[in-house]
Amino acid sequence: MAMFPVPHTSEWHCHTTCSDGALSPEALAGRAVASGIKTLAITDHDNFRAYRELSQIRLPAPRLVTGMEMSVVWRGMTLHVLSYGFPADDPGHLAFEKLQDVNRQARAEQIADKLERKLGVSDILAHARKQAAGDTPGRPHFALALVEQGVADTVSRAFERWLGQGKMGDVKSHWPTLDEAMKMTGSGIRVLAHPIKYKMTATRLRECLSEFRALGGEGVELSAPGISSGWYGQLLTMAKRYELLVSGGSDFHRPGSWSVLGRYPKLPSRMPDLASRLLEVE
């Protein structure tokens, strides 16, 4: 049975239009204020441009904590690692952001080439870039472009036929390895994101967390939407075994979707958590 999400005053995992979210950084910050969120970490995929945008705007906002969700490879599998609390001008995180932008541009061109050859559409990359508001487009933006051009009825249908896992538009990127990413971003507090999504066995997940900890990882995202009580208990045991702090977040992307900003399962008491760790470094 899935753990029930409850409202929190801290949000540690959400996205804006700087990656695959639907709200601008300004709109997301405003929504956080309206939701009673006091501390907000925006964790866009492989970039932290949202913070640069918000630094130019004067508006009521929660306390902001720098964040980024990094795409990495571990034993041939793509994982996501959340990095928090790093300086906005940190050379390592800026270098990682630049590297991933190059990787994502190459991936977008490959996706566009496959879709154009298979579906007979033209200028799909330009349409996807428009959906991404000028940023590097990902699969969700290509799905929106296919809907716009009348090739697909819905985004879900576009993923089912052409862009979902194992489909022709599911182009594997040359992400940096876990080891490489951890070495580049040492100034951040690194947390393994939504570990249940990777569909690992418990044994393999323990191996992953053990290696992650040895490379400087500090935490595991325990409280995420959809996690079962069984996996919650297993992850909690693993966190204790490898001396990892615990965190939680909604993984919010857009209003009306499967997640709600600031709502995720309750974190256990008497366990080191991300909020307390951030207080140590401030």
Image: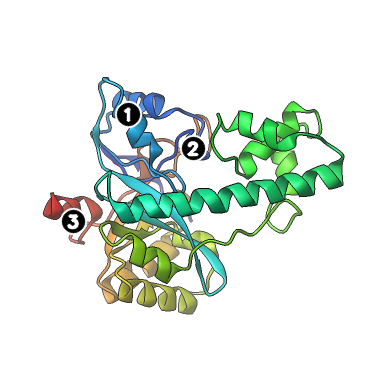
Q: Distance between the residues labelled 1 and 3?
A: 24 Å
Residue 265 versus residue 205 in the image, above or below: above
Q: How many marks?
A: 3
Residue 211 in which image quadrant: bottom left
Q: Mark 1 or mark 2, which is nearer to you?
A: 1
Q: Name the residue under label 1.
A: 54
Helix, strand or loop status at disc 2: loop
Horizontally, is 151 left or right of 174 in the view? right
Q: Kindly identify the amino acid type of the residue bearing the numbered disc 3.
A: Arg
Q: Distance between the residues labelled 3 and 2?
A: 26 Å
Residue 75 versus residue 186 in the image, above or below: below
Q: Residue at x 68, y 56 (%)?
A: 171
Helix, strand or loop status at disc 1: helix
Q: Name the residue under label 2.
A: 253
The crowd level at tag 2 (other Cα within 10 Å; few <14, some 14-19, many 20+) is many
The crowd level at tag 3 (other Cα within 10 Å; few <14, some 14-19, many 20+) is some
Q: Residue at x 19, y 51 (%)?
A: 278
Residue 170 is situated, as x and y percent measured from the top left of the image, at 69, 54
Residue 233 is situated, as x and y percent measured from the top left of the image, at 37, 66
Q: Which of 247 and 143 is in front in this view?
A: 143
Check if mark 3's residue and mark 2's residue have beta carbons within 8 Å: no
Q: Kindly identify the amino acid type of the residue bearing the numbered disc 1.
A: Leu
Residue 139 in which image quadrant: top right
Residue 161 is situated, as x and y percent measured from the top left of the image, at 78, 47
Q: Name the residue under label 3.
A: 277
Q: Kindly identify the amino acid type of the residue bearing the numbered disc 2.
A: His
